[in-house]
Image: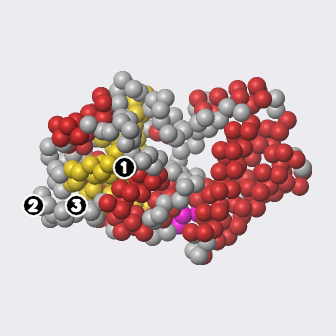
Amino acid sequence: MRGCMGTDKPLVSILMAVYKPNEKWLREQLSSLNAQTYPNLELVIYDDCPERPLEESIVREMITAFPYRVIRGEKNLGSNKAFERLTVEGEGEYFSYCDQDDVWHPDKIQRMAKVLEDTGSPLVCSDLAIIDGGGNKLADSITKVRKRHVFYDGEGLSGYLLVRNFVTGCAMMMRADVAKGAVPFVDSLVHDQWLAINAALCGRIEVIREPLIDYRQHGGNQTGVLMSVNSKQDYYNMRIENMRRRIIDYKARLSEYDELSQVIADLEEFNEARSRYFYGHKSADLRIMRKYKSYSRQAVLLETIMPFLPEWTAKVIFSIIRSGII
């Protein structure tokens, strides 16, 4: 497949996972892929919904500029495993991960591929404009709707990425060899954060600080601040217990890296104190939490008072945080 379109440009694999897609949004996304100005592409689609298969005629109609193939899942894997399978299947030199309901700017792949070619970096990401279900623009930067989203470029970012991710999967491109080296993906992280950590261990993260994609926000989006957190127990399960599972994965997969071993140990001490304080609210645990507050000042502030909050008050606070007001 490499060089299949008569060009000396590296092949870029667009890796798209689909699950019961909205047909209108899918057509808009496929149309934006077909309009990419980069000359050497393949599209690999993983259909993760065997009970309601993707109609391949839609893809055939919309993708005319480069080859595509559809892989049919035998059972629902979830997005992480779907993107893992796509990572294994991609044949390009670079991988561009793709959701089913966004709109890519025509020069997205061309600009990202140039950055990777010019720098040799393992990963580049861009900003995202935000649109609603009708395609109306809500913001010209993800940083305007996610107040804590801050882009960083450079080397040595793996430790930061263990805690907080700024790389959005649909707005990144990475070297295929680095992505394949991250297989199998861990279950405790969304695929883009896991890939970003692995890329940061291999070199410099590059950032294009302007939107190259219109990211569609709607009720079915998989990620978001405190998404599906409606009670204090929800918060514990999704923020503290999930971090415990992440630390287990970090210790199993990343502790061999000198630059991460101490960060992982500190995260474990921090999270164990959070867990104990949540139910016991002892001052000794609060002191440990404050010692590591640089990992998440907002979490430490919220968790300091959470054990004492009535459920209705906590629910209101979660709603305010989700809204992006604070």
Q: Which residue is mark 3?
A: 11
Please state which of residues 99 and 156 is positioned toward the viewer in this rendering: 99
Would you say residue 113 is visible in this rendering? no
Please state which of residues 173 and 138 is positioned toward the viewer in this rendering: 173
The span picked out in magenta is 155-159
Which residue sits at x=47%, y=64%? Answer: 184
Q: Which residue is mark 1?
A: 73
Residue 126, placed above or below residue 174? above
Q: Is 196 situated left or right of 296 in this image?
A: left
Residue 242, placed above or below residue 104? below
The answer to whether the residue labelled 3 contacts the one labelled 2, judged by CB atoms less than 8 Å apart, is no
Which residue sits at x=40%, y=33%? Answer: 216
Type of amino acid under label 3: Leu
Q: What is the x, y in percent for residue 189? A: 55, 53
Would you say residue 277 is visible in this rendering? yes
Q: Is residue 158 magenta?
A: yes
Could you say which disc has been placed on residue 6 in the image?
2
Question: Which quadrant of the figure contains the N terminus?
Answer: bottom left
Label 2 Cα neighbours within 10 Å, binned few <14 / some 14-19 / many ≥20: few
Please state which of residues 322 and 71 is positioned toward the viewer in this rendering: 71
Q: What is the x, y in percent for residue 51? A: 38, 38
